[in-house]
């Protein structure tokens, strides 16, 4: 028994020495990794302690550890209590906007990537790709400012998009698109597509470029046309990337970017524009009820976690590609 214990201790010591030797040999790589590790610890892992607030009657003077534990009371207040109408409205809006973004926004980068891959002239392709990527590098303030300016419809001025919509009969002279709750979701989705579609196409374009040209030559020899090339070669070749990206996208279904929402919405559009992130901001920070805000944030995260697990399970059942 003692020999076995001593042998196990020797093995552990040898493994420790080997690990130290490996780290010392490649210390430059670990030094390069250190800033990223610190960044994750400070901005991702340390704030996890704030989740305790969700289960406490949080008092800033007492802190998260000193406040009284109230169990799931904050969650009950959100789901069935005084804030339930606002919470469920925000939850519904978040899910609907994310679903629209998945249905209408997810295919656009794929289509763009296919278009880019079909451009033969490298100079022309580089120029078009750069123009498509450019909106991503503009701030949300700039993008939303441009959108609101183009949709302006007042007695003194009419924006370019507002004038176009009036000319084709979609709105009249009295319609204020930015002030109308019915138009918020299309305005939000189209703005997001304009800003991110080009940049998001990079991943799919790289997947297409990784497909062997021999496969395209083979289908041409068999008499296949361009649409058949895309159907039988391009899409199957980029299928693993598509599946992984859609699983990640489903996991972010309840994480609508609140910066764009805050910049685009107003009191007239709360009915369709208020989402979970803006609800957390309004209740937790502006309203001073940090515990309810933390509970809503945790609810959002748990639903997102469940969506990722479910989407990955379905992907694993119907294909050979999954996150794990």
Image (cartoon, rainbow, N blue to C red):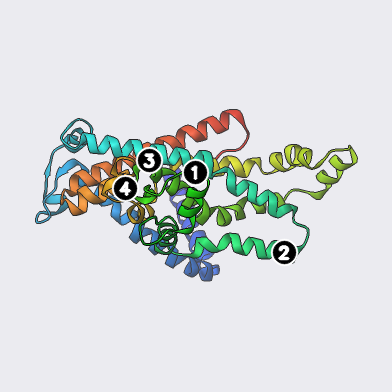
User: For this rendering, which residue is in front, 270 or 136?
Assistant: 270
The tag earlier along the polypeptide, 1 or 2, is: 2
The tag earlier along the polypeptide, 2 or 3, is: 2
The spot of residue 141 in percent (x, y) is 39, 63
Q: Is residue 305 visible?
A: no
Residue picked out by circle 3: 182
Residue picked out by circle 2: 124
**Label drawn at residue 277:** 4
Residue count near mark 3 (Cα–Cα under 10 Å), binned few <14, some 14–19, many ≥20: some
Image side of residue 242 versus residue 313, left or right: right
The residue depicted at 70 percent of the width and 61 percent of the height is 125
User: For this rendering, which residue is in front, 37 or 154?
Assistant: 154
The tag earlier along the polypeptide, 3 or 4, is: 3
Between tags 3 and 1, which lies in front? 1
Between tags 2 and 3, which lies in front? 3
Provide the secondary structure element on which disc 2 rests. Answer: helix
The spot of residue 207 in percent (x, y) is 67, 50
Separation of marks 1 and 2 at Cα, in angstroms:
36 Å
Separation of marks 3 and 1 at Cα, in angstroms:
16 Å
Provide the secondary structure element on which disc 3 rests. Answer: helix
Image side of residue 250 versus residue 212, left or right: left
Separation of marks 2 and 3 at Cα, in angstroms:
39 Å
Separation of marks 2 and 4 at Cα, in angstroms:
40 Å
The tag earlier along the polypeptide, 3 or 1, is: 1
The tag earlier along the polypeptide, 4 or 1, is: 1
Q: Measured along the vertical axis of the image, is residue 99 above or below residue 13? A: above
Residue count near mark 2 (Cα–Cα under 10 Å), binned few <14, some 14–19, many ≥20: few
Label 3 with label 1: CB-CB less than 8 Å: no
Q: Measured along the vertical axis of the image, is residue 289 above or below residue 149? A: above
User: For this rendering, which residue is in front, 22 or 122?
Assistant: 122
């Amino acid at each position: 028994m003692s020999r076995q214990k001593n042998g196990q201790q020797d093995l552990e010591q040898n493994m420790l020495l080997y690990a130290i030797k490996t780290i010392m040999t490649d210390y430059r790589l670990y030094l390069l990794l250190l800033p990223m590790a610190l960044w994750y610890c400070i901005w991702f892992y340390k704030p996890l302690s704030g989740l305790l607030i969700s289960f406490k009657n949080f008092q800033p003077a007492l802190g998260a550890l000193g406040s009284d534990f109230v169990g799931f009371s904050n969650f009950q207040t959100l789901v069935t209590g005084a804030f339930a109408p606002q919470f469920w409205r925000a939850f519904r809006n978040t899910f609907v906007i994310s679903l629209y973004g998945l249905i209408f926004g997810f295919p656009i980068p794929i289509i763009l990537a296919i278009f880019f891959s079909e451009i033969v002239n490298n100079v022309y392709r580089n120029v078009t790709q750069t123009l498509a990527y450019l909106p991503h590098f503009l701030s949300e303030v700039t993008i939303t400012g441009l959108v609101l300016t183009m949709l302006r419809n007042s007695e003194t001025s009419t924006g370019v998009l507002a004038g176009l919509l009036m000319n084709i009969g979609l709105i009249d002279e009295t319609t204020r698109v930015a002030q109308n709750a019915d138009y918020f979701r299309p305005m939000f989705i189209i703005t997001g597509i304009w800003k991110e579609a080009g940049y998001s196409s990079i991943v799919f374009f790289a997947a297409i470029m990784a497909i062997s040209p021999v496969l395209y030559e083979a289908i041409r020899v068999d008499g296949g046309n361009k649409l058949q090339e895309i159907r039988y070669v391009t899409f199957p070749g980029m299928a693993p990337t598509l599946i992984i990206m859609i699983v990640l996208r489903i996991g972010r279904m309840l994480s609508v970017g609140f910066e764009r929402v805050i910049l685009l919405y107003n009191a007239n559009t709360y009915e369709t524009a208020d989402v979970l992130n803006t609800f957390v901001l309004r209740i937790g920070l502006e309203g001073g009820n940090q515990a309810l805000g933390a509970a809503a944030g945790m609810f959002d995260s748990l639903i997102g976690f469940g969506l990722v697990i479910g989407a990955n399970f379905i992907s694993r059942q119907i294909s050979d590609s999954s996150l794990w």
